[in-house]
Amino acid sequence: MTILDVSVMTFDRPEAWQWLVQFCILAVALLLGNVLRTQIPFLKKSLLPSALLGGLLLLLFKAFPGCREIINKPMMEIVTYHALGLGFVALALKNNKVESKSSGMKVIETGALTAATYVIQGIIGLVVSILFFLVGKKFFYAAGLLLPMGYGQGPGQALNIGKIYTGWAEAQGIDFAGADFGLSIAAMGFIVGSLIGVIYMNILRRKGKLSSKKIEAAQVNKLEDYEGKGEIPDAESIDKLSVQICMVLFVYFLVYLFTNWIQGMDLGNFGTNTLKPLLWGFNFLLGTLFGIAFKNILKVFKKQRIMEREYINNYMLNRIGGFCFDIMIVAGTAAISFDEFGKFVLPFSIICALGAIVTFVYVLWISKHLYPDYKYEGFFSMFGMLTGTASNGMILLREIDPKFETPAANNLVLQALAAVVLGFPVLLLVGIAPQSLQSTWITLGILVVFWAVLTVFMLRKKVFKRRTENQ
């Protein structure tokens, strides 16, 4: 048999097309979702992401007899997992410039708001899941921590931690579909962020507290947005987009090598039971760290004149990140299975409802104190992000601040590193809580204390001002 014969025998098999067909399904769903959003007035006003609509279309498609097998659930989960990590790597590689309109302290405070909201979402979720476990519903006691993963982090992280929690639940003899539970919360988060955000915005407009503004042509990209000074040509021996994609994949490969290396180390009981499983789930965080490190290495090379041209292009990296997150949302929503949904529909509904209410009230309350000059702009940007993604926050913000004249947009973009640093203890607790009911109670107590500390930090000026006045 010749090489040509082997090629023919390989590529005419269905297995050779399986992955490509799944990506084609995701692409078609995303395009259809965009058509629905642009053509149906209600959906356009709702600000629901086109990617979420595409994922919901696939969920509806799976409900028809014989159609479920067409959409490969394991592949959708894998796409969701890797799209999250690749998207964060792309954003980490960007050369970000700090705008003067956002002060350093305000950025840190915004990061604290992000972390504190994760914490209060975790508290609400844990209280509900522990109560359901105690009343004999056979519900996994640590499941509530998937609320900040789904609302605050999105489908990718909800899937990652949900799968880890499924293993811990099975070890405790509890039947818990963690991935489906987490993905369902993430999908509900997009709906909450978009619909509640739009409803509240219209209420404020009717009361005269917001003026109606339309998104203007000022948001069209300028020439300098496409290409920076001293960058490599668009097409030479290698296309500029190819360079960006290769850098993203290289950094992500480093994440795999590092994580795989850690798995082979002896880290003791804590490292084996907590840290090692979490590392695979925190591919996005490692991708961010490795991306920043790689970007700084390139800067050193350029400063030492080892490199003469600028290889990083922010515009293209934005587009790569946007593509990854769109695909992640479609695939993550399509991966939801309702086979086990009946077992957790009640706790799911209570957790999502309470999570939405508490997130709305808390973010609005803190925004009035943190952003006195632009409280509504600050609120809508953060509420959209803390129930959906950063893009949801930007979409809501553009409705009332189309030219990004307030610091709200900059706060949202620049707070990411501060949120990661301040929220890192929460990520560790996510790995500790499922190990036993006692660990979950301890986690709940720590979260309450941590939330109080973060809240006092954000309101420190008002708290100390009152204390001074009383004295």
Image: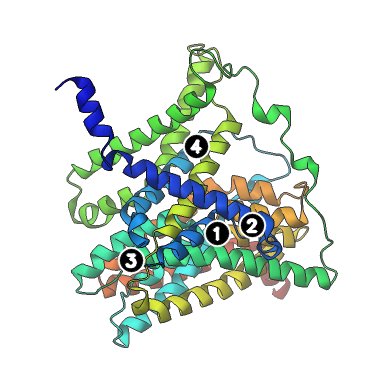
How far apart are the alpha carbons under marks 3 and 4?
A: 28 Å
The kind of residue on which mark 1 rests is Leu
Give me the residue at 83% from left, 73% from top.
Answer: 207
Q: Which residue is mark 1?
A: 53
> Which numbered circle lies on residue 178?
3
Label 2–label 4 contact, CB within 8 A: no
- Rendered location of residue 328, percent (x, y): 46, 50
> Is residue 463 visible to the viewer in this orientation of the structure?
no
Residue 183, compared with residue 317, is above or below; it is below
Q: Which of the two labelled residues, at mark 2 and mark 4, occupies the earlier sequence position? A: 2
Label 3–label 4 contact, CB within 8 A: no
Viewer-side label of 1, 4:
1
* Label 3 Cα neighbours within 10 Å, binned few <14 / some 14-19 / many ≥20: many
Viewer-side label of 3, 2:
2
- Rendered location of residue 417, percent (x, y): 52, 46
Q: Which residue is mark 4?
A: 90
How far apart are the alpha carbons under marks 3 and 1?
A: 23 Å
Give me the residue at 62% from left, 57% from top.
Answer: 36
Q: Residue furthest bottom?
A: 135
Image-based side of 121 in relation to 282, left or right: right
* Label 2 Cα neighbours within 10 Å, binned few <14 / some 14-19 / many ≥20: many
How far apart are the alpha carbons under marks 3 and 2?
A: 30 Å
* Label 4 Cα neighbours within 10 Å, binned few <14 / some 14-19 / many ≥20: many
The kind of residue on which mark 2 rests is Arg
> Which numbered circle lies on residue 37?
2
Image-based side of 287 in relation to 317, left or right: left
Viewer-side label of 3, 1:
1
Label 3–label 2 contact, CB within 8 A: no
The kind of residue on which mark 3 rests is Gly
